[in-house]
Amino acid sequence: MLKKILFIIIACNLFVVKGQQNDSISFKRGIDKPTILALHHFGIFSSRIHQNFKTSASLSTSFSFNYASGNTFHPFVETYIPKDPEVQKVQSQLIWYYRNFNFINQETTPADYMNIIIDAAIKEFRFNINIPINTQNELDISLRSYLITNGKYPFSFFTSDESIEWFHSNIAGGEDPYGRRYYGLNQVNFKYTDRHGKILELHNNDFFISGIELNHFYYPSFLINKNENLFFNFGTHLGINTAKYNPSIDVGISANAIKKFVLKNNNEIHFAFGASGLRKNVINFNDVVDLGNNPYLATIESDIEFTKFTKKKNYNSIGINYQIQSRFNKLKEADYYRLIGKWQEINGGWQHGFSTLYTSLSNWSFLYTYGQPKFKLTLYFKEDFKVNNAPDFQTGISITMPLLK
């Protein structure tokens, strides 16, 4: 049923575009970058800010459809966080894997308790409409939805457990370095118990609409230096989260700078840098699951893109993007938490289900775009070189088409 619905939506938009022969999307305007946010198992339930590396507002309304697939794996881990300041002080003197305290007796040593297990291929289906308001302002509306799958072939060719473990076994990483084979390939185990006892649990083929995002971008003319090809834009962001585990509203701001170099034959190189801050759960509409006790998510992102134009004035571009996001949980708890997992049964990384929630998340994306006046097509893959499974490996495709002139 989901596939039929997606097919109908895409077909209808293709029909609209085909019927508007005089319309075209705004041509090359800075860096071509669709929404390439990592499919993190906490992040999918909140709005996160997509840095905007365009140099100016679009001239026409456009529609884009983004599809992404990411593989995430964390074995079962339990966490105890002592509440007594004296116990915290003692534990902070020890390396985390040597810590031990009487966490079972809540009367003598009260502690928060959490557990998590994540094993799934997460699919994202995102629909965007970009609406120009005037030459300096535009509105971007995004609907995000997700499908939880076991990642079997052929629907997760690059992000399946088999593909990732084949890479580990034959190219880099070694045989079953993190226990995927030990626990079994192509499974869905997606369950998290927060410190208040609330449970988030998903199963194979669970589909949900996670939220709607409203993004306003302002391109100030007084900061743009066309002689130096230097451009700036600022964004304000409102996220309405609709999933049952986190019905809430997020707000944020962003700032971006883009530098363009024009080469021989009018080919181009763009450099971009952006930063953003998001306040999660400004308003909660219900009793939500605690998806990290750090209320703020800060992001820094940089991008470099080379564009080569064809004789017909279409273009091909390749880009490299780096993003780093602040931690989901407050860092101070990592000084005294106790992690318990089946560390003897796998080679490494058993603690990552919780330890990575206390560290910044980073990833590299590699993008290719083909653009012409009637559409833009972008392919990308994202790699987590830090091994924090945010996710481990992710691929995506995006197509942008005009709606109205």
Image: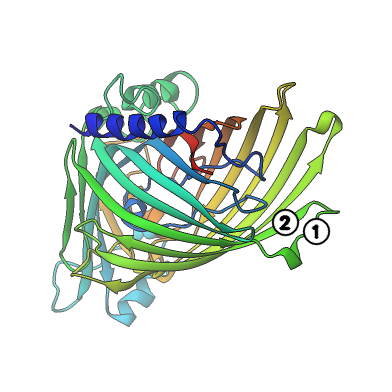
Of residues 284 and 216, the one drawn nearer to the viewer in this rendering: 216
Which of the two residues, 297 or 258, is positioned nearer the viewer here? 258
- Residue 279's spot in the image, x, y percent? 42, 70
In the picture, the quarter occupied by the C terminus is top right
Residue under the point 55% across and 41% down: 364
- Name the spot of residue 217 as percent of width and height, x first: 56, 60
Residue 164 marker: none
Q: Choose the circle earlier in sequence order: 2 or 1.
A: 1
| Residue 290 against residue 84 in the figure, above or below | above
Quadrant of the image occupied by residue 196: bottom left
Q: Where is residue 98, by image quadrant?
A: bottom left
Let me know if residue 392 appears in the view. no
Contact between labelled residues 1 and 2, with CB atoms less than 8 Å apart: yes
Amino acid tagged 2: Phe
Give the residue type that dot 1 points to: Asn
Residue at point 59%, 46% (across, down) = 322
Label 1 sits on residue: 225
For the residue labelled by badge 2, is the local secondary structure a helix, a strand or a loop?
A: strand
* Mark 2: few/some/many CA within 10 Å (<14, 14-19, 20+): many
Disc 2: which residue: 231
Q: Quadrant of the N terminus?
A: top left
Task: Report how far apart the C-alphas of labels 2 and 1 lie in the structure.
Answer: 6 Å
What secondary structure is marked by label 1?
A: loop
- Coloring basis for residues: rainbow
